Amino acid sequence: MQTRTRRFLLASLFTAATLLPGALLADQLKMKNGDVITGEVKKVEDNKVFIKPAYASEFSVDMAEVVSIEAEKVFEMQLEDGSEVAAQFAGSTAEGEQTLIVDGAQMNIGMLAVTQAAEPEPWYARTSHVDLNMTWNNGNTDSKNNLLFADTRVRLGEHRHLAELTIRRDQTNGIDTKKQDLFNYSYNWLFNEPWYLGATASYERDPIKDLSHRYMVGALIGRDIFKDSHKFLTASLGVGYSKQKQSGLTDSGATGLWNLIYEHDFKGGDISFFHHHDLNYQFYGDNNLILKTNTGFRFDIIGSLYSTISYRYDYETEPAAGSISYDSTLAIGVGSEF
């Protein structure tokens, strides 16, 4: 008899859960004016809480206007004292404090004490871009300028891989004026996030600048200065070994490394700003300082397709004989994210 009763209760609970309206199972925001907003709480950022109801697109409300948050999933939270916890939002106390569940225990804090909350990053994540910029002119001057840029960022748990490829071909009146191939790769071990240790390698050739090849390998330490759903800034410093053949001369030695990556999405990701730069100081030969930057915007068109405008600036204090110290390029084209 007890077995039958237990089965009946379990079946009833399952049926009730199936038939309950979605709103009853959703996260909730209780507002100071008495409103209750149901949906899926996405994140807390910039003193706002973001929620996606079943009936509308994601939007945000000011944390100062929220009485309590209830959400079942676990968020990675940063509190105003700088501490970080993995916790659930569990409503409010009678005194008006927000209740968090941390490792099964309650923690009561002021609503504004939660400065950031986001879902834990997935173990695997990847973002890749391919940009194509082409300019062809015919007439008094025949010119062809082709620039292909591709990058990818892959995260596997606490391991991150970043790679960039640039292929550029310029020609004027049938004469080659640029033949650059550049590949950069970096590995980051996020041993104590946001801090990481890593390794980096690069290869470059540009026979028009008398650069037969330039290889570099190095070790680095870096830090993610900020990283959330719409902005990312990281910087690293390191040392390495470089070998190059330029103007028929081969040279090699120690090199100092500096790298910075800054990316920021605006208008829900419809517009994206990016700035990457690499600084390499060669402690040999003429102590050449090499700077490469790529700065620009991406504008969503449809789906994964976007238009892009970028400004590239390459600088060397000791270029090959007969070459000036810098190259600058303003490129406009299209690209795809996948």
Image (tube, grey):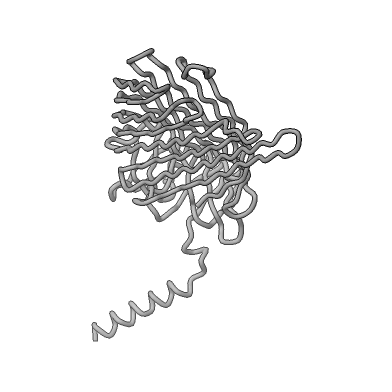
Q: Nearer the viewer, residue 314 or 72?
A: 314
Farthest residue to the top: give it.
286
Residue 77 placement (x, y as % from top left): 39, 41
- Is residue 70 or residue 141 the one in the foreground? 141
Quarter of the picture holding the N terminus: bottom left
Query: Viewed as shown, does residue 87 lie left or right of 146?
Result: left
Task: Give residue 32's quadrant in the image.
Answer: top right
- Quadrant position of residue 133: top right
The residue positioned 30% from the left and 29% from the top of the image is 218
Residue at image position (47%, 47%) is: 128
Residue shown at the point (39%, 33%) measured from the top left: 224
The image position of residue 334, as x and y in percent, is 61, 45
Q: Is 316 left, or right, of 268 in this rendering?
A: left
Residue 10 in view in this figure: yes
Q: Is residue 89 visible to the viewer in this orientation of the structure?
A: no
Q: Residue at x 39, y 40 (%)?
A: 162
